[in-house]
Amino acid sequence: MLKIYNTLTRKKEEFKSINEKKVGLYVCGPTVYGYPHLGHAKSYISFDIIHRYLKYIGYDVKYVQNITDVGHLVGDVDEGEDKIERQAKIEQTDPVAIAYNYENIYFECMDKLNIERPTISCRATGHIIEIIEAVKTLIEKEYAYVTDEGNVYYRVKKFKGYGKLSGRNIEENLSGERIEIKNDKENPEDFALWKHAEKGHIMKWPSPWGMGYPGWHIECSIMSKKYLGDTFDIHGGGMDNIFPHHECEIAQSEALNDKPFVNYFIHNNLVTVNGQKMGKSLGNFITLPDLFKEYNPKIIRFYVLLTHYRRPTDFDKEKINEAIKNYEKIEKTYYKIKKETINIENNKEYDDIKELKNNFIEAMNDDFNTALAISYLYEVVKIANTELNNNEKDKYKLKYIEAFIEECAMKILGLKFEEEAKTDEELLNFVLDLRNELRNNKNYELSDKIRDELTKLGYEVNDRKTN
Ligand SMILES: [Zn+2]
């Protein structure tokens, strides 16, 4: 029985899907204006695990993830520049080129982390018509209003459930947020559904309220409704999305559809660097392309899974080096097992491994506790190594362990084990043998070429006597 910690109720709850065999999952995707960073890795690996595990226990999962390519303003407030337009100025190119480029880089990085792609990846700019229709409906229902400046705002006071996700009430927000900025809102807590395009703004569309562009929050209400319906099973995102983003999504969707928006809200915790918050302004910001120069992405994935998704992942080089050792131990064991089990059919069960598998599944059922699940994987690897060191190896047991590793570590956790690369020495001997064969056949032209190339690479070739 799967239990999920639901941010809406602040409790672990038994998971029940709306449709018996299906799950609708929506996760807020990236705003594509810069390189993805370690925080993205934490978030999308966490939801990849949730996606994989729901499939593993038999659900047909429709996983929708948006791409924010317009409307996300600097500082996450209703004032200031669009993040993508600002980056376009810096790189002296079009906003659309910025969004396209960073979307590609985002997916390249996610692929390297062995994150399965969502069923549907949808862009905000592809849903402007639906957004305008929804804003019109919200105005008709008096949940929104148009100002003289051509902006449309959501009237927060009208929505009784505002604050139910974050636990904040409007008064608290007033003291906590930067809302003293002068603007055309009825109330400072109101948020933009549609923004009037100022002079020089490139990404804009015609609307009943003039040329403009959507606010940041509305796209998720609209795309989740379009692909998953008015009410769906699971909505995910980083903890920093709880307020204001997800609170605003609830307000928009429930006012629009007169139905509950989401049954389970799941939020992953954030990344710290040596215990400190990670941030561009703090100078400890780690982008994934930079990180992958130093570490194999499969290690980063493993490292993220060593911490439960609701706890912060601390980027600490010593701890990563420790993780590399543990990872390599599993990987080596797996390949040693594979060598022993060629032509062995898996037809026996072993109680000790079976129990560890049950423990592994129980850990995953307990709000996707990968950290605990991996501790059982270690135990299995230990048993495997004892077996591998025996003179009389039980190959059926090794086969049974192989199946455990493939199912639990590879399929559910998405870990990747690669065949050990041939050592340089083996490769070099192969080249030298080949060269001797050429010399034996009196193909001196090619054999000399190989010798010269090897010399360039720093190897000295001493010719053995040939006949
Ligand atoms: Zn969202």
Image (tube, helix red, strand yellow):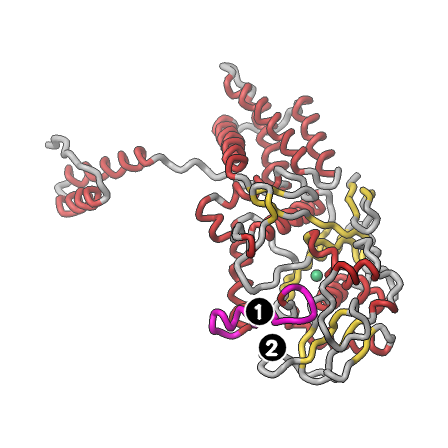
Residue in the picture at 51% in, 35% down = 318
Which residues make up the magenta segment? 75-94
Residue in the picture at 67% in, 49% down = 47
The reply to whether the residue tagged 1 has its Cβ within 8 angstroms of ligand 1 is: no
Please check the rendered image and state whether residue 345 is part of the magenta-colored stretch, yes or no: no
Identify residue type, mark 1: Ile
From the image, tell me which residue sits under label 1.
Answer: 84
Earlier-in-chain disc, 1 versus 2: 1
Image position of 239 (left or right of 300): right
Q: Which mark is residue 203?
A: 2
Please check the rendered image and state whether residue 90 is part of the magenta-colored stretch, yes or no: yes
Q: Which mark is residue 169?
A: none
Label pair 1/2, CB-CB below 8 angstroms? yes
Query: Looking at this view, is 106 or 53 the one in front?
Result: 106
Image position of 156 (left or right of 285): right
- Measured in 3D between alpha carbons, the distance from the residue under mark 1 to the one under mark 2, in whole angstroms, is 9 Å
Where residue 400 sits, quadrant-wise, is top right
Count of labels in the image: 2
Identify residue type, mark 2: Met
* Mark 1 burial class by Cα count in 10 Å: few <14, some 14-19, many 20+: many
